[in-house]
Image (tube, coloured by chain):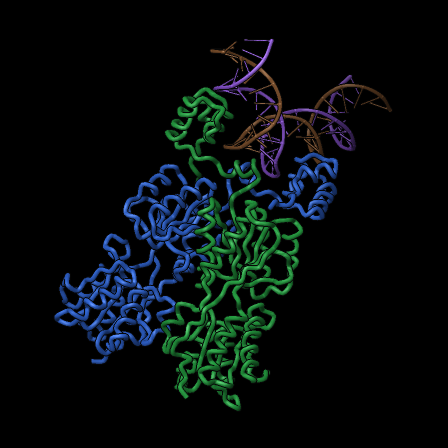
Chain colours: A blue, B green, C brown, D purple
Amino acid sequence: MKKGHQVTMKEIAKKLGVSVSTISRALKDSPELHPETKRKIVEMAKEMNYQPNLLAQSLRISRTKTLGVIVPEITSHFFASCISGIQDHANKRGYNVMICQSNESIDQEIANIKTLVASQVDALLISLSRETNHYEHLYELYSREIPFVLFDRVHEEIPVSKVTFNDAGGAYQVTHHLLEMGCRNIVYVSGPEDLYISKKRKEGYLKALTEYGIKENPEFIKISDLTEDGNIRVAQEILQMNPKPDAVFCMIDPVAVDVLTYWKSKGIKVPEEFALAGFTNNPTSAVVEPPLTTVSQPGYEMGKLAVSHLLDQLDGLASDDPISIVLDTTLVPRKSSQKTI
Amino acid sequence: MKKGHQVTMKEIAKKLGVSVSTISRALKDSPELHPETKRKIVEMAKEMNYQPNLLAQSLRISRTKTLGVIVPEITSHFFASCISGIQDHANKRGYNVMICQSNESIDQEIANIKTLVASQVDALLISLSRETNHYEHLYELYSREIPFVLFDRVHEEIPVSKVTFNDAGGAYQVTHHLLEMGCRNIVYVSGPEDLYISKKRKEGYLKALTEYGIKENPEFIKISDLTEDGNIRVAQEILQMNPKPDAVFCMIDPVAVDVLTYWKSKGIKVPEEFALAGFTNNPTSAVVEPPLTTVSQPGYEMGKLAVSHLLDQLDGLASDDPISIVLDTTLVPRKSSQKTI
DNA sequence: AAAATCATGAAGAAAGGGCATCAGGTTACT
DNA sequence: AGTAACCTGATGCCCTTTCTTCATGATTTT
């Protein structure tokens, strides 16, 4: 299958008996051209349905006006929202977006970076995969002076701008809420321990406990690999615990939903037996029965801020010094945590 | 913010004292080069961390190995799945993907096409916006011989390949299921009437009714604008109907979820008072209470097939004659339709 | 008043950006 | 001399931009 022919400046020039440079000038409305000539050219360009070849243009001015985005997975509602925010605001400022998903694999992540760089994107927005535990690929980007920002899943040490949620704060909000509901034996179900959000949310969880004079109990911190099987295993373990916990705070909503579903199948009542809470405010969480208490993270907003800051840096509207933008989360209390004692 | 320097063939050539063309040959492993020279060059390229400039390459061979994708919205789980399928299989075949969302606006859709074409994508995959009611932009693509395929939301007349679900078949499955459950007064909640899927699903709905000797009753076909307000309005209307329907089939899951949520708030029991069914099998539908009977449409599969066929055409592995791929749906019966009479 | 100079406006020529490739050109060997 | 084997130069892809050229009419000079 072949692509049809594209009109080039050369052709317009030939048709009008002028030089290519004149066409170029006319199309960028240069002042050093006779208005009449300009008019004629613009008209002809329109008539011939001329579309500038962005490729050639980019090669010439060595800017593609394209951004690369890497997310762990597109099908996650949260990341889809981020992408949406990035898209909209990039477009608004005349930039295109190439999106890749790492599928939570570090190798994919590295490969994605490579292709995006080869495609000459002007900058990158990256959210790290779950697997990412070394960061050479990021440092290479850094040393090659390719601008990028990290969002949500970040690596703290590297000196580039980052956009994150106040994860510790959000976890604190939830835990505090559970404590206010009268719960005192609160389990935290974490993801893999080296994940940025695992750590941060644990921090907030512990801080709230400390404020209530409860000291950390390692038994009450469960780790899931975040697969459905892993989540169910944790749900089972919790049932065996002694003393029996009265509340469970899951690092992300899907874990809470899996736990809830499993427990429901076993006839265990939420919130009567266990108060339950998640994090992220997925659409699903609003409609499960009982509706899930959670923390909302506006993904669209995050994408918007990340891309806006990046473009500000690119366009020289902001300093190149890395900054850290931290977005606040809001507690969304729902029935799953309404434990009446 | 400036981008760091990129190593070019010229520089390798200079360093090694050979010509640029030799570099080019070495890097594509041409046979007419001394193995030793080749080895040296490849080594040096690696050492200097040479990355070919895809832009220049594309300009030269006038193929970008990039596909453009336009979907109504990324945050919809179904379209996100399609994108995921497209991504994975495009990458597998050495293609990159640029994604745009039309936000259900025809103007955005047209603008998206324009930028993607200007970016010299090799081909497009498009799912039309809800607003799209004229098709000049598609015919223009067609006449400019830019390859593209339509998926899910298609325009039937245009002679390009299309990938769709058997929407009529799926609607037939649901309606048939509701009939088997003993329902006889089944409401169909449709989206805007000129939408492809509105029409197709209505077809299947009517076909099933006919088989049961029930004749079409326009009163039983409700139209929603698919906003939450619109959906709730329909939910209210249904409560006023006389005779009272015993089942409701919604064109897409979100409508069913809105109706369910509204009814629950009014103390109306599903499936006891009304059997309820949707279409698409969103993740949400599995976890609402009661779980929603629906029809599953594998989005990932759709994306995969669409892109595979397109690339087959592009690479000359498939004929350029347009074909229509129709994917089967499967009924997912859940509690919301278990009406015991 | 005629000639020389200059300023200005308008458009062309050409280079350059990185790569691929056709058509030649050097060697070294038979 | 003929022929491989190996390498190079030039050109083109499409666009931007700097440098030049060429008129034209205004200003100055003689």
Q: Relative to B233, is A138 on the left or the right? A: left
In this view, C14 is above or below A189: above
* Count of numbered badges drawn on the protein: 0
Which is more toward the observer, B309 or B251?
B309
- Which residue is located at x 73 percent, y 41 percent? A37
Residue B91: x and y, percent?
A: 45, 47
* A20 with respect to B240 (left or right): right
Quadrant of the drawing holding the C terminus of chain A = bottom left
Q: Nearer the viewer, residue A237 or B204?
A: B204
Q: Quadrant of residue B112?
A: bottom right
Q: Quadrant of residue D14?
A: top right
Residue B114 lies, in percent from the top left, at: 59, 51
From the viewer's side, name the closer residue of A297 and B25.
Answer: B25
Res. B257 in view: yes
Q: Considering depth in this image, is B2 or B61 the residue closer to the camera?
A: B61
Report if residue A200 is visible in the image. no
Q: Position of residue A311 (x, y in %)?
A: 45, 48
Against A274, residue A98 (above or below) is: above
Residue A157 vertical position relative to residue A217 in the rendered view, above or below: above
Q: Is residue B299 left or right of residue A206?
A: right
- What's the residue at 53%, 42% (across, down)? B64
> Could you say where residue A61 lies in the image, as x and y percent from the top left?
53, 38
